[in-house]
Amino acid sequence: MQTVVTENPILAAEILRTGGLVAFPTETVYGLGAKALDETAVKRIFEVKHRPQDNPLIIHIYDLSQINELIEGFPENAQKLCERFMPGPLTVVLNCSKVVPKEVTAGGNTVGIRIPKNETARKFLRAANVPVAAPSANLSGKPSPTTYQAVLEDLDGAIECVLKAEASELGLESTVVDCTTTPFTLLRQGAIPIEELQEVVDEIVTLDEASSGLARSPGLKHKHYSPQAKVRLIDFPHQIPDLPGSAYIGLTMPNVRFSKSYIAADLEDYARCLYEFFRECDRQSIQIIFCQTVPRKGIGATIMDRLARAARGS
Ligand code: TXA
Ligand code: MG
């Protein structure tokens, strides 16, 4: 199949409306969209990504008024979160209505909903004018794509269209909050730090992955966010062994000169550039990536979550 690469959100929306798969930019990472209420289109997302069937998809809309047909009940505190953080990198999990296909929910009773902030995403979703189910637009197990080129690397020839725009401005996925539990549960750390959510809803508990957590957030049990290279976390970049074929990403200059390194300007920059750095290391057949740890505060907690997963998976 010839993948159409376009900057025109109207064309991309037409392709989606006729049942095609369209990768589109968001402020977090690029998504791979299909009409959410079209089971056949949604099934193809799982096929082309090689995504495990038990991992549900987030539905993307452009306006909160579209949420009503998709959900059953909207707790007041969930409304508060939506009013404060949407459009933006927040996904709320709510009880789903009967119109949502089981392919989207992975057979469960809940659905994740998100309203992206990225301008191109918004034009695309508005033109599509239907709810759009979309996971990250990578092959399962690879780091999420933050550029349209990374999408093509994984999916060129397998999907109908890539809506091309700038690199994702945040670089890490949305924060996922389960609003069907009392208190609410943080299912995935993400671009909005938990501290910011707690300013609106003071009790949000974190998921204990060791216990029931994995069943409630199926995405967490799958291999995620890992490059081919081995990932090693280091607290002090002046103690890195001098190994050939290795790379470094962090906030401070390391003691060793690496053939490939990235010194991030701040935590936001670290978050924005991490996945593309992983991908670039794989393109260059780097064997080991040393990643500097950061304090688990604010966006630092999300960076550490992704680094820990990448290190575990390698
Ligand atoms: O920033 C993002 O969220 C990006 C962009 C494209 O919007 N999307 C994304 O989708 O990261 P995906 O499919 O790669 O990750 C969605 C995560 C998975 O961990 C999944 O298990 C969880 O959200 N999730 C989705 N629906 C859920 C539900 N109903 N219940 C529990 N977890 C859910
Ligand atoms: Mg993903």
Image: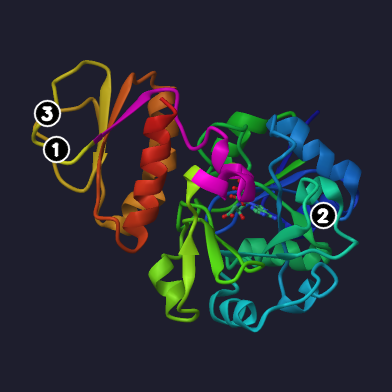
- Of helix, strand and loop, which one carries label 1? loop
The tag earlier along the polypeptide, 3 or 2, is 2
Please indicate, yes or no, whether residue 302 appears anywhere in the rendered image. yes
* Residue wearing tag 1: 237
- Of residues 173 and 119, the one drawn nearer to the viewer in this rendering: 173
The number of discs equals 3
Q: Is residue 198 left or right of residue 100?
A: left
Kindly identify the amino acid type of the residue bearing the numbered disc 1.
Pro
Asked if disc 1 and disc 3 are in contact, CB closer than 8 Å, the reply is no
Q: Position of residue 313 (x, y in %)?
A: 44, 29
Amino acid of disc 3: Val
| Earlier sequence position, callout 2 versus callout 1 | 2
Q: Residue at x 91, y 49 (%)?
A: 18
- Disc 2 marks which amino acid? Ala
Q: Give the residue furthest to the front.
A: 211
Task: Determine the secondary structure under disc 2.
Answer: loop
Q: Is residue 286 above or below residue 170?
A: above
The span from disc 2 to disc 1 (Cα, nearest Å) is 45 Å
Disc 3 residue: CB within 8 Å of ligand 2: no
Q: Is residue 20 visible to us here?
A: no
**Magenta region, residue range:** 211-233
Mark 2 CB near ligand 1 (8 Å cut):
no
Query: In the drawing, does residue 17 fall left or right of residue 160?
Result: right
Q: Earlier in the sequence, mark 1 or mark 3?
A: 1
Q: Residue at x 38, y 37 (%)?
A: 277
- Reading the image, the residue beneath label 2 is 36
The residue labelled by disc 3 is 256
Name which quarter of the figure residue 268 lies in.
bottom left
